Amino acid sequence: PCEACGTTQKQSLDTNRRWKKNFRNHAVDHNHKTGQVRGTLCYQCNVSLGYMKDNPDTILGLFAYLVDKDNSIEYNDKIKRIMEVINE
């Protein structure tokens, strides 16, 4: 499964039928500066990370925006862990 959102390869295939075959597969994510492999991501998470230019400030800024503007967000274990790391 995707290490960011948990989507399985099959879920990704079912959701993304309109995309080309190579875009439907999970991707091996890597650091573009060092080449070090970080893990496996689904297409959406991999592309989103690319759009964010792997910048934690941008990613956290978007996270903060959602938390601030959308009071329907449920604080699941993943979000609680992120908040703990931020507050350390």
Image (cartoon, helix red, strand yellow):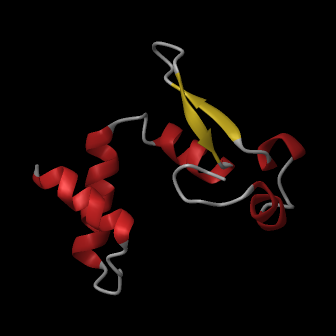
Q: Residue at x 37, y 63 (%)?
A: 78
- Measured along the vertical axis of the image, is residue 52 above or below residue 8? above
- Measured along the vertical axis of the image, is residue 5 above or below residue 69? above
Q: Which residue is drawn at 26% across and 42% down?
A: 57
- Percent from the top left, x then y, of residue 76? 37, 74
In the figure, residue 79 lies in which quadrant? Answer: bottom left
Counting every numbered tag in the picture gives 0
Q: Residue at x 54, y 59 (%)?
A: 5
Q: Please give left or right for residue 44 compared with residue 50 in the image.
A: right
In the figure, residue 80 lies in which quadrant? Answer: bottom left
Q: Which residue is drawn at 53% across and 48% down?
A: 48
- Percent from the top left, x then y, of residue 27? 69, 38
Q: Given the current orientation, which residue lies at the most extreme left position?
A: 88
Asked whether 22 or 87 is in front, the reply is: 87
- Measured along the vertical axis of the image, is residue 49 above or below residue 14? above
Q: Please give left or right for residue 88 compared with residue 85 in the image.
A: left
Q: Given the current orientation, which residue lies at the most extreme top position?
A: 34
- Percent from the top left, x then y, of residue 12? 75, 59
Asked whether 20 or 30 is in front, the reply is: 30
